[in-house]
Structures are given as structure tokens and as C-alpha cells.
Amino acid sequence: MAFSLCRRILSAVVLFVGVPLVCVGFASQALAYQHGGRKYTPPPATATIKVTVVRSTNSKPIPNAAVVFHPMEGDRDKGALELKSDEDGNVTIDVIPIGDTVRLQVIADGWKTYGEDFKIETDSKEILVKMKRPTEQYSLYGDGHGTASSTTTPKGESTSAKPSQQTPLPQ
């Protein structure tokens, strides 16, 4: 009987002393979280973007095309995320926050580079990119029609030996 009485007294002491100590421990952690600890900010909700890269002529997929995502902050580029399209021409990414603008760039060998800005407003977006064959390139050094003005002389001719028509010959 004495053993049973001691046991009850010991459990009562543990109950009255132990429970408040545990509560004080939790309270101090809560105060540290509020005053000096870092506050947790959950990441923004992101959208799942699926890009399909196909030929404009027959809608066949273009595999191994570089699909580059440029998240924009105002008019400033925040970096680039590049993925390669699979054998079906598909690329899927799910790290762009909803509400952001993303500049999409698609580069594939033998195809004209594609670029366009998209505003991500929903939690999923599908983009179909129809790649075109390259056309004439514009050159700052040419005549503006894709052809460069030639400043070289044909083989066998030299312009240094001929006098200019504008300068008079010495007398």
C-alpha cells in the first residue's frame, strides 16, 4: 500500500510540475518566432506552362528545339530557364509564378527564331509555336533588302591604279 501511495504522489508531482514546464517551452519558442526568428513566407502560386513546337507547314513536331523562358519584372529580364523539346516537340515547366510575364524564345537548327511575351494569368497555359523556315536576313551593312553592298573588286582588277574621276590629275 505504501508503494502505491508513493507512486500516486510521484505521478501527481510530475503532472503538476512537468506540464507547466512543457507549456513554458512551447510559449518561449512561439515568442522567439514572433520577435527574433525568421518569418515563413510561402512561395507564390505557380503555373504549369506547356509549349509545343511544330513546323508551320505540316504541324509535325520539332524535337530538340531550345525553349528559353525569360521571366520579366517590368521591362527587366530576371534570368533565363532553357529546356529542350522532346521527340513530340513538347516542353513543360511549372516554376513561373501566376501573374508574371514570361518572354518565350524558341531556337531550332534550320528554323527562324521565335519570340513572344505571354502574361501568365491562370494556373495552366498551353502555347503552340509554329516555326517557319528562315527568310532573307536584314543587314545594317547592306541596302536594307537583305543584300550587302559589295565593296570588293572582282579578281584581277585594281582600283588603286586608276585615277578617280573626281580628282584632277596633277599638271
Image: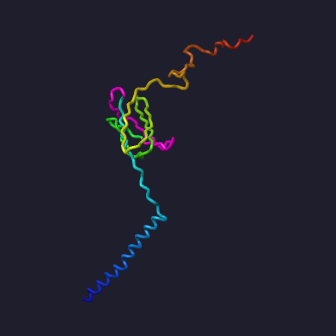
Colouring mode (rainbow / by chain / secondary structure / one colour): rainbow
In the image, residue 89 lies in the stretch drawn in magenta: no
Which residue sits furthest front?
121
Which residue sits furthest bottom?
2
Tell me where residue 42 sits by quadrant: bottom left
Q: Residue at x 44, y 24 (%)?
A: 135
Please provide percent x and percent y for residue 111: 41, 29
State how many labels appear.
0
Q: Nearer the viewer, residue 88 or 101?
A: 101
Judge whether 154 appears above or below 100 on screen: above
Q: Residue at x 37, y 79 (%)?
A: 17
Which residue sits furthest left?
1
Look at the image and tell me in which quarter the N terminus lies. bottom left
Q: Residue at x 43, y 68 (%)?
A: 29
Residues shaded magenta: 56-81
Task: Indicate left or right for 119 with 160 as reference.
Answer: left
Task: Indicate left or right for 108 with 10 as reference.
Answer: right
Please provide percent x and percent y for residue 34: 46, 64
Please provide percent x and percent y for residue 112: 43, 29
In the image, residue 67 lies in the stretch drawn in magenta: yes
